[in-house]
Every structure is written in structure tokens, then in C-alpha cells.
Amino acid sequence: MFGMLTQATTCEDDIPKQNYIMNEDKVPQEPYLTTISSDYFQANVARHGWKWKGSWRIGEDGISMRYYATNEWDFMPNDLYFGTDSMTVFLYKQDCNLRRTDSYTYDAANNLIKSNAIVYMQLTDADSLNITFIERLGNYYYKSSYERMLPYEVNARWNGSKPEQQ
Amino acid sequence: MKVRLILFSLLSFLATCQITGQQLKPFVKGGLTIGLFEGTDASNESAGHTGLNLGAGIQIPLSKSHPTFLEPALVLISKGNVYDVSKAGGRVTFNLWYFETQLDFVYRWKIGTHWRIPIGTGLYGAYGISSKVSATNGITWFQGIHVGKSPSMFDDEIGANRWDAGWRVCTFGAEYRQFALRCDFEIGFFSQFRNKKLYALEKKSQGANWAFSLNIGYSF
């Protein structure tokens, strides 16, 4: 039933026709991956908060599917803040605004962000206002886009959330 | 294979000379070539690839009343493209080397006693002998191509044809006695990206070699 409802609310015309290739670990590979250097990451992505805009679930066949509304998710998407060496994930869980902070490293060889705060995150594109990732959310991989938050929005997320209990 | 191709080209030259029985003038030429892939422009952070060309040919007069010539030539030439990847902090270079057979139809406009203005057009056929995609240190990926491994464009991943052909749109310049200064512009018929579409190119069919050459030459 849930599946039928999901199908009904999915706009097929807007599904990106991007084909991802699954590697041996069944992680989708960005077909047009281009290196984003650590310097560029630190200059444009770090020290900013990023607000979730939308996600496309990547099926096991490598064809992505778009989801529109947050109520279609079995979890809420996250907002992000990258410091110079630590990152914070703002999440909504069990009717509560929480934040999870941990250190991270940026691996420019494969554009990977490695941290205990997230499962898998590969930066696929970035500029000073928008970033896109392939990320693991729940049980699936998604292509997600985020837009840069204004400082007051970051403060609101920070002040309105509690540290997540591990 | 490469040696046979060169021998075939040389024999073709000699055969042409025998048939015409005209007064032939061999020449040598060499210079710089600026290469570009068709469909790329400045907004795609593309810069021309600077390479070299070196070759030899023969001027075959076609008429006694008009200064028209057929000019077959065999040239070693490098083509390609360079992409400035600002987000990666460096450059990615696509470099291709070809043995190229050029066939130009040239009109030589005589000015004064020693000066001539050649202008012409023609066709070329080429065979790729070497190809490499290289990148500045620190760049591992470019539009899905693992440039960190310095792949060849002739590999299946990119799928460039070893054989290439195209139109030598124009060749023009100035000649003084036996010395020549020539500009050539040529465009390929086939994309160099059969299996891999670059985001920098608007259509998959794009990506043919474009080349602008500036040469100096000497005829014997």
C-alpha cells in the first residue's frame, strides 16, 4: 500500500535519467565525478551550514528515483554544518530536534567525507551556494542536494537542537 | 602496422609524382598546433592544447597557365584539449599524436618577383600512434574518467578512434623565395569520445579534433 502511494506521488517526468554504476560493494558511483580539492572544499563548503533541498533515491539498478515530500520518508532528511575539522548533522528523530557532532576528514582522491556522524557521503558537486552528495540515508543511497544556510539559520538549528545521546 | 602505414603513404606520394610527370618541389615544414575538441568553449573551462607538428611533402603543379598545386604531405602532429578544472585546482590534458596525411589544393598568387601568397583547402586522414590523458597532481577524477591512472584515449573507456579524418578548411600564408609561413585550420569528422560523454560537451556527437597550426617551411 505504501509503495502504491509512493508511486502515485512520484513525478516520473522529473526523474533524472542518470545511470549510476554500482561498485563491488554495491555503492553507486557518480558517472561524472570530478575531483574537488581540499582547498576548494575548505574555501567553499567548510564553515557553512547546508540545508537539505531534495533527494533522489538510487535504485539497485543504478537508476535514480525522485521523492518529493518529507512525509514519504521513513526518516527526516538532515541538515549539515561543516567546520574545518568537525561536522554536525542536524536531524529530527522521535519528535525531537537533535544534533550529532564528530570529526571528519575529506579525502580529495574520491571526494569522500569520512566521519562517524554519517554512514557514507561522496561530494559530487559544490559551489559557494549549492552542494550535492551521494549519501547513505537509512537503507538506501541517495543523490541529495543542499543549499547554503544563512548564519541565523545555522544558529536557529544549533539553539533549537539537543546533542544526540549515543 | 605503423611502419606499413608510413611506407604506404610514401609510396602513394611517389606514385602520384610518377603519374603527373610534372616538375615537383619537395618541402619540409614544422611548427605549433593549437588543438581543441569541437563543442568545448570558454564556459566549460577549456583551453587550447599546444602541440607540435613536423612533416614533409611535395608541391605538384596542376596547370602550366595557372599557379595551382596539389600538395600531399605526411605530418607528425599532436592534437587534443586542455581543461582548467578550477574546483580541483589544476588542469587535465588530453594529448593525441597522429601520423597525418594531408592533401591540399593550393593556389599561389604571385606578388612581385619573390613573394607568393598561397591559399588552399583540402582533406586529411590520420592514424593515432599515441594518446594519454594526464592531470595535475591531486586530480584523480575528471568527469568520470580516472585521470589519476593516466589512461589512453584509445582505451575502451573513452573509445577514441585511432583512425581520424577531416577537412582542412583553409591553408594560407606567405612565401618568400624558398621560405614559407603558413597557417592551417582543420576540423575532424568524428568525435574522440565514442564511449564516454563529457559534460563539457553539449552533445555526445561532439568532441572531434579541431586544430590550428602555424608553420614555417622550406621548399627545395
Image: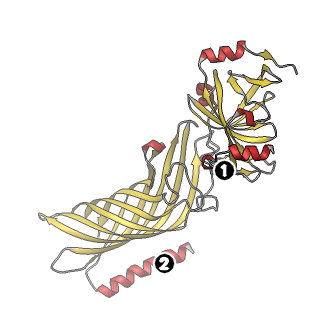
Q: Position of residue B125 (x, y in %)?
A: 44, 71
For label 2, the residue is B7
Chain of the residue that carries numbered disc 2 in the rendered image: B
Q: Please determine if labels 1 and 2 lie on a single subunit.
A: yes
Residue A109 visible somewhere in the drawing: no
Number of residue marks: 2
At x 74%, y 33%, the residue is A71
In contact (CB < 8 Å): disc 1 and disc 2: no
Front-most of residues A59 and B10: A59
Which amino acid, mark 1?
A: Lys
Residue B73 in the image: x percent, y percent?
Answer: 38, 71
- Location of residue A150 with respect to B209 vertically, above or below: above
Type of amino acid at the residue the image marks with label 2: Leu
Residue A22, position as x, y percentages in the image = 75, 51
Disc 1 element: helix
Q: Residues within 10 Å of mark 2 (few under 14, many from 20)?
A: few
What element does badge 2 sit on? helix
| Residue B73, placed above or below residue B52 | below
**Residue positioned most to the left:** B112
Q: CA distance from mark 1 to mark 2?
A: 34 Å
For this view, does B136 lie left or right of residue A105? left
**Badge 1 sits on which subunit?**
B
Name the residue carrying label 1. Answer: B149
Position of residue B174 measured from the top left corner of the image (x, y, whole percent):
23, 59
Query: In the depicted view, which residue is nearer to us: B135 or A121?
Result: A121
Of the two numbered discs 1 and 2 in the rendering, the one whose residue sits closer to the viewer: 1
